[in-house]
Image (cartoon, grey):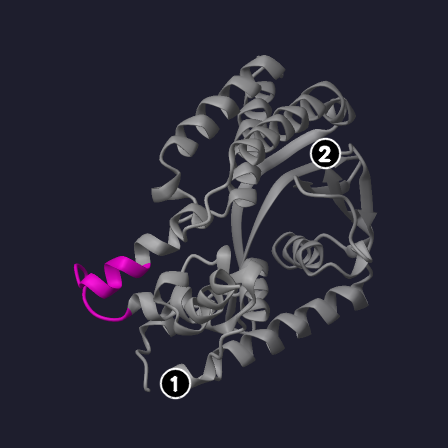
Amino acid sequence: MSMNSFWRSKFAWSNSRHNQWAECKKQYYFNNIKKYDGLPNDPGRELLWRLSELQKMPFLKGRLIHEAVKHQISNHNAGRGVDADIAKNFFLSQFDSTVKDMNLVITEAANGFPPGEKEINDIRKDGIKQIENFCNIIWNNYKGVRCLGHEKNEEFFLDGIKVRIKYDLLTEKDGMHVITDWKTGSSGFDDVDENIQIGTYFTWLNKTNGISAGMIKGEVVYLKSCDTEIAEKTDADIKKIEEFIKKDSAEMLSVRSEEDFPASPEPKRCIGCNFLSVCKEGKEVISSLKSQ
């Protein structure tokens, strides 16, 4: 089946797009291509846009923690200081109001697998703990550095390919630029130096600001455990990241029809997929799961 070409004009590589492409190409198709079919107000198009706005439960927690942290850093930069109680109250009000309408907002609930009361309470407690860790422990490490930006979307180009990033915090001290990513899940990359997301941050700073690899550090901070992992890269490492992004983009842009987007159905993945209700393969997996 042929498909529209408008999506190509909207194409931009990002780490999140890469992850979706690697995880399930059918999900990628619905989210990045199929929802541009038809005209505005077309029922099928509108449905896909609504589904794309659903949030998986872990992503909801992560997003709200990031927003609470963002507000506190803004307060700090404005001279008002960081306040754990204000941050926790923000998280609780947003989280609890979202949970009340979970069937309309949370992916798992919309797919017929709503989180239970215990899971909701555990997520709520974990979110509060991570915010306390940030305000009372982690932020103390950043009081002597210059904040250049936080929670910002940026973009740059590699051989005509638009690349998008969103970093959590960018600081500088004595010429050393540190770009930080807050993690709200469990600790541990297999090798943080090989992490694509961090590598893309290095590439952005190098390409857009002319900062040499030796004056950049990547930092992954786990708000749950307060652990920090540091990534350092060379000019050769940045070149490898550039080549990876260009190769990955070429694969994404080489598709010609819907048949180029096979599904990768798996129960846990499908339960948390925004497009389960419109995916034949996903519905078959879930139907089989319910019949067991």
Is 215 rendered above or below residue 285?
A: above
Give the numbered dot on residue 224.
2
Residue 115 picture location, percent across and down = 50, 41
Residue in view at x 48 percent, y 60 percent? 290
Amino acid found under the numbered disc labelled 2: Lys
Local packing at callout 1 (Cα closer than 10 Å; few below 14, some 14-19, many 20+) is few
Q: Report crowding for label 2: few under 14, some 14 to 19, many 20 or more residues within 10 A (C-alpha).
A: many
Horizontal and vertical percent for residue 85? 58, 13
Relative depth, front residue between 201 and 82: 82
| Mark 1, residue position | 257
Magenta segment boundaries in residue numbering? 37-48
Q: Tell me where residue 136 appears, x and y as whole percent.
A: 72, 18
Please name the residue shown 32% across and 86% down the image.
2
Q: Is residue 255 above or below residue 93?
A: below
Query: Going by the picture, which residue comes out furthest to the front?
Result: 292
Q: Three-letter amino acid code at disc 1?
A: Ser
Residue, x 69% and y 29% (percent of image)? 146
Q: How many discs appear?
A: 2
